[in-house]
Image: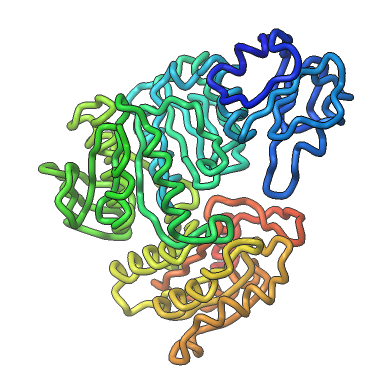
Amino acid sequence: MMVLKDILYKVAINAVVGSTLTEVYAVNFDSRKIAANDLFVAINGVTVDGHEFIDVAIKKGAKSIVCERIPEVLVDGVTYVEVDNSNKALAIIASNYYENPSENLKLVGVTGTNGKTTVASLLYQLFKNAGYKVGLLSTVKIMVDNVEYKATHTTPDSLTINKYLTEMSVAGVEFCFMEVSSHGIHQYRTEGLHFEGGIFTNLSHDHLDYHKTFAEYRDVKKKFFDELSSKSFALVNIDDKNGMVMLQNTKAKKYTYALKEYADYKAQILENQLTGLLLKVNDSEVWTRLIGNFNAYNVLAIFATAELLGLEKVEVLRLISDLQSVSGRFQYLISDTKITAIVDYAHTPDALKNVLETINSIRTKNEELITVVGCGGDRDKTKRPKMGHIASALSTKVIFTNDNPRTENAQDILNEIEDGVEPQNFKKVLTIADRKQAIKTACQMAQPNDIVLIAGKGHENYQEINGERFDFDDFKIVKELLVKLEK
C-alpha cells in the first residue's frame, strides 16, 4: 500500500479533484483487474479508450483515477488526477509504485529494427557465463536470473517492466538487458526508467503501419537516446547512416561501432562460414559460432557493451567464443541427407536481404537455396512487394506462404508479395498458403547439400489466423519433416 501523492511524484499534473492522501493498494490500467482502493489509469489506446471504463473501475472499487479528461459527473470519495498523457503518467507511476527498481541495477536498452533480440539475449548469456546474476526483457522471453517467464510484447507495458525489474532487484540481479521497441518508446513504456546505457543496432523499413513515415519511426528511436542521462553511455552503429542521428542531442557518453567506418569499436571479418565467424575486433581475433555479416555487427555491439560495463577485454573475447545462437535467429540443422535447414525471424526487407546475402556468400552455388517466406497480416503492407522481390531475386527457388495473416485475407497478402516479383524470376516462385505444406514442399524439393531457409517467424511457436492462435513452430516442423523424408 502507498499514498497517492507519493505515487504521483514527478508526474506532470494539470488538475486534481479530491485528496492526494488517498491510500492506493494497487495500480492498473485494465478496469477488469481493478479491486478495492486501487488506482485506475485511463489510457487512450490504439483500439480502446480507457476513459470509457472509468465508471466500471469505480464500481469495482477504484478510489483514484488518473485520466486525460476529468469526467463531468464525479463520484464522492474518488480522487481524479488530470494529466496531458496517461501513458507517460502510467510509466512514472509504475516506477514510483515499485520504488524505482531500475536504479538498483544496471539496465541497458537495445533498440533498432534488426538485432535487438540477438544483442540483448547474447549479452544476457555472456554476463551469466561470466558469473553475474542477470535479467533479460526480450521478445523471446523474460529472465529473472535463472527463472524464465513468457514474453508477450517486445517491450512490455510499464507496470510489467517495473514488476519484473523489482523481482530482479530482490533476486540480486546486477545487469539487465532490455529490448526497446519503437512502439514502447512512442507509448512511453520506458519513461521513468534509469538506463545505464543504450545500444542502436540499425534502422530499416518496418512498422510504417504504426508510425506512418520513416522519419517518424527514426525520430521515435532517437527519443530514447535524447532522454539518456549524462551518466549513461550511448553506443551506435555508424555504418548505418542513422547512427549519428541518434547521438545528435544525447547527454550520454558517446561511443560508436562499425565494420566499414572508423569507429571506437571496429571489426573485420577474416572468415565467414556456416560454422561461424572469425573476426578481428579492434586488435584482437575472436571465433564465434554466430554466422553472417549481420552477426558480426551484433558481436561487435556485445563486445563494446561488455567493455563499457567494466568487463576485461580478454575475458569478453573468451566469453564471446562460447556464445550459443538465439532461438529462431539463424538457427540451423543439417539432416542425415546433408540438407541444411535454417530458421530465421527475418520479417523485414532488410533482415531478409541480410540473411539471404549471408547464405549466398557462404554457399558454393552448386546447391539450391530454397526460401519459404510470407508477411504478417494487419501490419505494414508496403513491405510486402519488397519482400517478394528480395526473396525471388536472391533465392534459387521461393515459396510464398502464410505468416500470421491475423484478420486479413491470406490470399490478398500473398498477392501483394507476388507483386514484387520481377518477370525474370516468375519461374522461381510457388505460392502455397498452408505454411506446413509450404515447408514440406521445400523439403521435398531439396536435394543433398541444398539449403532451405524458413523466414519470418523465427522463435514464434504459433500461427495467428482470423484472431485465433494455433500451435506452430517452424524449427520443430522442419526437423520432423526432414526426419520423415529420410526414412
- Is any atom of residue 410 visible in this view? yes
Q: Which of 325 and 382 is in front in this view?
A: 382
Seen as rendered, the residue at the extreme right is: 59
Residue 293 is left or right of residue 389, and the answer is: left
Residue 485 is left or right of residue 291, and the answer is: right
Please, is residue 274 above or below residue 423 in the view?
Answer: above
Query: Where's the C terminus, which quadrant?
Result: bottom right
- Residue 356, quarter of picture: bottom left
Residue 155 is left or right of residue 219, and the answer is: right
Residue 480 position in % (x across, y down): 59, 59
How is colour applied across the structure in the image? rainbow
Q: Which of 361 and 4 is in front in this view?
A: 4
Please, is residue 42 above or below residue 386 in the view?
Answer: above
Q: Residue at x 85, y 24 (%)?
A: 74
Please, is residue 456 above or below residue 247 in the view?
Answer: below
Residue 312 position in % (x across, y down): 20, 27
- Is any atom of residue 167 visible in this view? no
- Count of numbered marks: 0
Query: Where's the N terminus, which quadrant?
Result: top right
Residue 127 position in % (x across, y down): 35, 29
- Residue 56, quarter of picture: top right
- Residue 212, quarter of picture: bottom right
Q: Which residue is drawn at 73% across and 11% down?
A: 19
Please, is residue 417 above or below residue 172 in the view?
Answer: below
Q: Which residue is drawn at 25% across and 32% down?
A: 253
Q: Nearer the viewer, residue 104 or 483?
A: 104
